[in-house]
Amino acid sequence: MVFSSTLFLFLFLPAVVAVHTVLPRRLRNAWLLLASLFFYAWGGVGYIIILFVITALDYAAGLILPRLEEKRALGAKKAFLAAVVVCNIGTLAFFKLADLLLGTANALFSADLPILGLALPIGISFYTFQALSYVIDVYRGKVAPGRNIIDFFTFVTLFPQLIAGPIVRYTDIERELADRRVTSSAFASGVSRFAIGLGKKVLLANTMGEIFRSASSGELTMLLAWCASLAYMFQIYFDFSGYSDMAIGLGRMLGFRFPENFRYPYEADSITDFWRRWHITLSSWFREYLYIPLGGNRRGLLRQILNLLIVWACTGLWHGGAWNFLFWGLYFFVVLVLEKLFLLRVLEKLPMLVRRIYSLLLVFFSWVLFAWDDTGKLFSMIRALFGVGVPLSSDKSVFVLLGAASLFIICAVFSTHIPASIWRWGERKLGGESAHVICRAAVAFSIIFLSTAFLVGGSYNPFLYFRF
Amino acid sequence: MNEKKHNIPAAAVSALFLVLLILGGVGIFLFQRESSEVENRSLQTFPQPSADAILSGEWQEKFETFTSDQFPFRDAFNAVGVTVRYALGSRLVGGAVIGTTPGGEVRLFEEVEEDAERALRAEKTVASIDALAGTGVRTVLLAAPSAGAVYRDDLPAFATVPDAEINAALAGDHKFLTVSPDFAADESLYFRTDHHWTARGAELAYRAYAEALGKDPVETSFETVSDSFFGTLHSRAPLPFITPDVLEAPTLDVSGVRVRAGGGFGGLDALADISLYSKDALDAKDKYQYFLGGNYGLAVIENESVDGGVLFVFKDSFANCFVPYLTRHYEKIVMVDPRYYRGSYSDLCELFRTVSPDDVLVLYEASNLANDKFLSPMLDALAEDR
């Protein structure tokens, strides 16, 4: 089930949230667990078993690790953690990479290994990381193991963030899992946040997706290649950050505070900065549970570069079982190492505008790499972007651009902090907390109304991060 | 942010949010509609659950379609969505290209999708028509230009003009006769909200046809049969400010005409009586079906007040409002719509031999002709049989 559907918006959401609000607190987690399992099972009953097994394993691991600690069996504790991590990551890697490796082996050695054709269990990349954060934190003694199996299952399966993040760590919501209040202020702010996310997804990302699709099909021209890639750049941002906003908003309606996942990434002034603003919960997860355990930057420059290589290869493959995602990760590895070595110092001396353009261009090309898992299409797109072997423009190119121009401008504006700043300025002028609440609600309801209009018409509604 | 535990406006907003969503959700289950007049398609009604359907996920899929198909005020919401897209500059919505007439009214066109195969298909179809003409029967091709080719100036800026492939395929010499009516852009020749030509457009084409074959065209006038026609393109882009088309029919004397039609399976004997003009269609959404009541695989039109002349027509829906004019020139007209023909090729060959037509007419809209996959093999079978 996706958030941007009439089914979710008008049946699932109000039913789950309304019942959650009126239930006594001790029953709320059980209700959310039930709802989340229903939410997950809707798209296919089969994969719920994997979700179940992984969650049960990690819950059990959380109980066993402290016992080993008590018995001072530190070697066994380490080995046990390693085994649990291998099970978690192994399952994830199996679904992501098995076919990639088989296919590549077939191509390289002209072998004929059967391709498994497994569909990726929805959300596995997200919930595996969430559950794993708990196991590792228990190992580190940072959290006490969950007292209650229902609470833990609720944490892993919590439907707002189950399938597309943000990657919520157990420590983030530990307190709220045990006891939470839903205040009307929090609920109302959740409504606004959810509406903003819905609008980003349905009004902006879907529309950009349509432009991407029509611009990248058929004969390419240089202009079409730029339109398509720009549309994709906007689509992926509004799609993903919209989904995170919806998750955070839903969380607030349910009394949770999920971590922020995006901070105007297209305003970054370097790629280092970009990755502090894009999919923040993923990069901080990798930092916390991979980069720092590997030694981070404390073991000399060469070791640091190797650590970065490992982290970025993993980040790439986390996004999908195709070579282009690995290249995409390595692309950032190269840029980030260069920035660390000298580029950041150079950039600091340049005017902000130059730094922004530098970052945007690099991000732009990274999305081209990201968008095309078919190498042939990738290369023809890159050639077209540089105008090699394609005409500069065509009637269709101009037609697509004319239809997209105003939307490009809207998307560009909404990629920045400007709308939020204007809003805050307006709120300062317009005194009174009540007036603020009412204005926010008016905007939220308008966005929901318009999004419903776009959704009901059955327009294009894919969801990019389902693949990951 | 200042967060008091409870404040009344926030509580009201929260409650209103849930109430509005719940109202929408309940509305889905009330007032179910079997089909949408505006969109001209059937809608998903509540799917009956079964264990198999749920396990396979089929029921869930249908249920999701159901929630969006039966959404309260769906048509109004849809119109809002389309209008916003238009206002933001999009001139291509739901496969309809949105143009403007010189009078400032909206004229909708079919999207010209890029298709690398189309040029090949067009060549193949033209070659098949040529092959049939090569067997000695007088063959005429009337490819009605697509609305976008007639009203180029009404297309939005830089929109693709259709028919390039078929025009390329038709260049050069052929054994068949080509009739190209001169559609100097008179606004009344094609509907604005539907992809078809009007009875006036068809009449212009008929004159060109009669002239080419040395026949004396009948004079006719037109009567309005409906002034509230929203065509199939309007279904795709239901902009609220589009005015309806006027549906006209020629005032021809068709008293001696008998029409029989069917799928084609079982030959002429299996056909049922229909009429040239279907009054029932005027109460439905797709009022173009007034002409012949729609498309049939095989139809026979006989006019007892005409002596002699047999015509065999291969056609798409453009022929439906064209063929009434021809009833004055042929005693018998056999019409085959290859997309809907359910009989066998051998039966068709035998029929073709039995009726032994004086003329063969291929009448398609140009873009349909270039996209069609059914006509060429049928004509090849006929040519081979002769």
Image (tube, coloured by chain):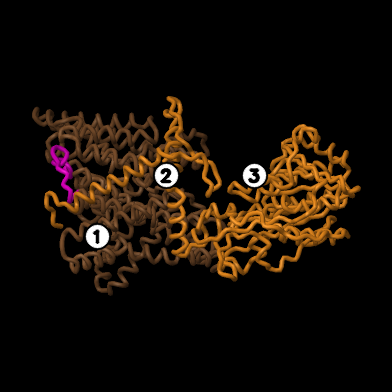
Chain colours: A brown, B orange
Q: Say which mark, if any, is on residue B280.
A: 3
x, y percent for residue B94: 52, 54
Q: Distance between the residues labelled 3 and 2?
A: 29 Å
Describe residue B262's horizontal placement relative to residue A328 as left or right: right
Q: Residue at x 43, y 28 (%)?
A: B49
State which quarter of the image contains the C terminus of chain A: top left
Magenta stretch bounds: A171-186
Whether residue A312 can be seen here: yes
Describe residue B164's horizontal placement relative to residue A32 as left or right: right
Q: Say which mark, if any, is on residue A439.
A: 1
Q: Say which mark, if any, is on residue B71.
A: 2
Rendered view: A258 above or below B44:
below
The kind of residue on which mark 1 rests is Cys
Magenta stretch, overall SS = helix
Chain for numbered disc 3 = B
Magenta includes B209? no
Chain for numbered disc 2 = B
Question: Do callouts 2 and 1 point to residues on the same chain?
Answer: no
Magenta includes A182? yes
| Near-viewer residue (A10 or A46) | A10
The kind of residue on which mark 3 rests is Asp
Query: Answer yes or no: do the residues labelled 2 and 1 have beta carbons within 8 Å?
Result: no
Quick one: label 3, few (<14), some, or many (20+) residues within 10 Å?
Answer: few
x, y percent for residue B375: 74, 46
Question: Do callouts 3 and 2 point to residues on the same chain?
Answer: yes
